[in-house]
Image: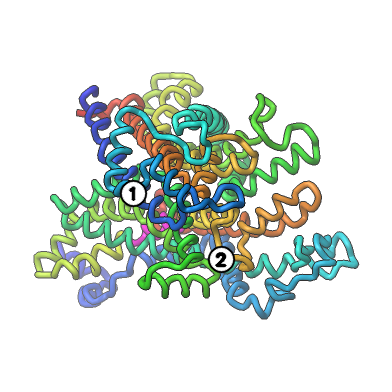
């Protein structure tokens, strides 16, 4: 197992190289530079040249890339061009916890609602409860974040006046964004749990468990539900990527100072190091999540062994 | 053994030999037609496509006809004096008109992005799975690396690049593309940006399917009577693997529609004044305190269309693999 994990971590290296290289190339070929304008004024060419020299932008591009990689090895993501007093490390240290907080709450909400809902639907297969849950789940999957966010704001913040419209200043502010992001997830988790559980309850070992006289609760909770989680865990990797994407939308709609907002602003400002840094963080998050998913298989299904 | 069969009443071995085998696609089609929700969704989507195509004849107004005094006019079922069935937006443009035209963008993205993803992914997966060995190894390593890419970020970066190039003009090679994109209201580059990375999941599914069929007897049989690689791939493998691929592609369509709507929402989508549901939702969201009625028509249109694609995809999956009925 340890060897497997080490090998997987070594495989991160080519992936991260590919991500940095393609982001680097893509950001640089976008027309326009970071010092085209300050506010509404354009800068004189001499000052632009000086600024570019200061940040090493006058060097050949391949040298800049190698220098970036060299700094990356020392976990230095460089200065931000548009936030003059902050480095990219500062920006990420400030905003990543907020995005992670939002994402984890949404993910937890998705699992906490989705798994029980799916299990109930499966245990009452083809009953009204099943059809109701399934329909609500499909509906939930069909509502994008850009609709769910405004809808929740309109109902709970504007009509009922229960919760704040935007910003990120305390538990009251967390509810709407987390719910907006979590409902879509719970819908997907519910449908997957239902389908998976329906297949598992037909297995021989479930019959065995019942035959030896275990209570139905125990059969379902310990034997069926645990095994039915394997497909759910499989999609957790892609789902995590979806949460990252979702935090983007939700951060913009609710005015949350997370990583996604920095990313969108930094592209507009051609703030190369911030674009590179945020992209790297997202990529790293995705591959670490995928690794955790693969490791958790082995725990859920003892037949799976990694060499 | 065969003589026993031949003795069965009404069994004509000659006829059995020449009977054209029904394709898996045809079988699935028959099952699909029995699924009322899926058929209903399919009919709805066909009507929507027709509405999008014939929008100029259905829509009450042109897409950029502005009646500034009528800005944020209520829908006519709330305010009977209003001439607009679904109200007017901040420039006094008819919302109904823009919702109908907005279907053009969402449906085009659904069709083109899935066609691009399906064709690239199928070919990639077929080649990788069929030839196996080191070809497979290299091709799948590439897929693994791309799989870790934060997809939306690259779509945004590509779209920013395309937009900047389209505004400032690029080299001679991209000029025709820029022109075409402008004629399409900015849709071409969205197709490219969304299609560019979305084939990866499809490639994996297609490869997995090829691997599971490759060693089956009928493929071996085809090889034994001397069928070429190309014939085996297109005549024997493709029809069998197409089902699951179409299913997963249909279920991926809502994601494409959401991506376009998101890009338009953050201002990286189609060019003004081309209406897109994402742009309209953004405009409605900005006016949500004072004029929420602008938000609902495009939001409902987006949700209902996505719902129809989801139901259709579910129906297709049940049709192609009856064992999976009701699962997922």
In this rendering, the answer to whether B103 lies above or below A296 is below
Q: Residues within 10 Å of mark 1 (few under 14, many from 20)?
A: some
Front: mark 2 or 1? 1
- In terms of secondary structure, where does tag 1 sit? helix
Question: Which dot marks residue B105?
Answer: 2
Whether residue A13 is visible to the viewer of this picture, yes or no, is yes
Image height check: is B194 above or below A233? Answer: below
Marks 2 and 1 belong to one chain: no
At 41% from the left edge and 44% from the top edge, which residue is drawn? B150
Q: Is residue A235 visible?
A: no
Scheme of image coloration:
rainbow
Mark 2 chain: B
Q: Is residue A20 above or below residue A213?
A: below
Q: Position of residue B147 (x, y in %)?
A: 34, 45
* Range shown magenta: B242-251
Residue B127 sits in quarter: bottom left
Q: Residues within 10 Å of mark 2 (few under 14, many from 20)?
A: many
Q: Position of residue A268 (x, y in %)?
A: 52, 50
Foreground residue, A27 or A253? A27
Q: Which residue is most to the bottom?
A: B57
Tell me the quadrant of the picture where the N terminus of chain B can be found. bottom left
Residue occupied by mark 1:
A22
Secondary structure under tag 2 reads: helix
Residue A182, position as x, y percentages in the image: 57, 36
Tell me what residue is drawn at x 26 percent, y 72 percent. Answer: B11
């Amino acid at each position: 197992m340890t060897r497997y994990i080490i090998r997987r971590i070594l495989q991160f290296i080519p992936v991260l190289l590919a991500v940095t290289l393609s982001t680097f190339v893509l950001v640089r070929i976008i027309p326009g530079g970071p010092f085209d304008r300050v506010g509404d004024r354009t800068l004189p060419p001499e000052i632009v040249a000086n600024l570019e020299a200061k940040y090493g932008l006058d060097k050949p591009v391949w040298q800049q890339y190698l220098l970036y990689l060299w700094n990356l090895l020392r976990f230095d993501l460089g200065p931000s061009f548009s936030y003059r007093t902050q480095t990219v490390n500062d920006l990420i240290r400030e905003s990543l916890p907020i995005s992670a907080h939002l994402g984890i709450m949404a993910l937890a909400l998705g699992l906490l609602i989705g798994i029980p809902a799916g299990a109930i639907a499966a245990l009452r297969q083809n009953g009204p409860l099943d059809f109701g849950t399934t329909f609500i789940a499909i509906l939930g999957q069909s509502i994008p974040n850009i609709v769910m966010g405004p809808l929740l704001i309109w109902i709970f913040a504007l009509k009922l006046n229960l919760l704040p419209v935007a910003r990120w200043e305390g538990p009251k502010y967390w509810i709407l964004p987390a719910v907006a992001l979590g409902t879509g997830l719970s819908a997907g988790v519910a449908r997957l749990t239902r389908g998976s559980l329906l297949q598992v309850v037909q297995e021989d070992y479930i019959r065995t468990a019942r035959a030896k006289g275990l209570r139905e609760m125990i059969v379902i909770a310990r034997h069926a539900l645990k095994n039915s989680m394997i497909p759910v865990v499989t999609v957790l990797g892609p789902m995590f990527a979806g949460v990252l994407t979702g935090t983007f939308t939700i951060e913009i709609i609710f005015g949350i100072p997370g990583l996604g907002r920095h990313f969108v602003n930094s592209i507009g400002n051609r703030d190369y190091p911030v674009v590179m840094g945020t992209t790297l963080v997202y990529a790293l998050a995705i591959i670490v999540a995928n690794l955790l998913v693969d490791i958790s298989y082995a725990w859920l299904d003892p037949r799976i062994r990694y060499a | 053994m065969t003589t026993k069969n031949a003795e069965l009443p009404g069994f004509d071995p000659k006829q059995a030999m020449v009977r054209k085998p029904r394709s898996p696609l045809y079988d699935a089609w028959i099952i699909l037609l029995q699924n009322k929700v899926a058929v209903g969704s399919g009919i709805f989507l066909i009507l929507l496509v027709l509405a999008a195509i014939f929008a100029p004849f259905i829509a009450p107004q042109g897409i950029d006809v502005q009646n500034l005094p009528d800005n944020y006019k209520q829908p006519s079922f709330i305010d009977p004096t209003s001439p607009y069935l679904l109200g007017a937006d901040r420039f006094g443009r008819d919302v109904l008109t823009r919702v109908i035209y907005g279907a053009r963008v969402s449906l085009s993205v659904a069709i083109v992005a899935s066609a691009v993803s399906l064709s690239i992914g199928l070919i990639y997966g077929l080649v990788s799975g069929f030839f196996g060995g080191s070809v497979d190894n290299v091709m799948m390593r590439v897929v693994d690396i791309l799989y870790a890419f934060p997809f939306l970020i690259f779509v945004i970066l590509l779209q920013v690049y395309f937009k900047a190039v389209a505004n400032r003009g690029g080299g001679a090679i991209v000029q025709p593309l820029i022109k075409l994109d402008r004629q399409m209201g900015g849709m071409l580059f969205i197709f490219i940006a969304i299609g560019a990375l979305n084939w990866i999941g499809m490639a994996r599914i297609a490869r997995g399917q090829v691997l599971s069929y490759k060693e089956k007897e009928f493929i071996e049989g085809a090889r034994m009577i001397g069928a070429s690689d190309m014939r085996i791939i297109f005549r024997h493998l493709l029809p069998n693997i197409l089902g699951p691929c179409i299913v997963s592609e249909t279920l991926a369509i809502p994601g494409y529609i959401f991506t376009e709507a998101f890009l338009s929402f953050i201002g990286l989508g189609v060019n003004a004044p081309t209406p897109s549901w994402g742009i309209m939702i953004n405009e409605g969201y900005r006016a949500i305190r004072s004029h929420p009625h602008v938000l609902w028509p495009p939001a409902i249109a987006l949700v209902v269309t996505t719902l129809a694609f989801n139901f259709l995809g579910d129906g297709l999956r049940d049709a192609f693999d009856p064992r999976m009925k009701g699962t997922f």
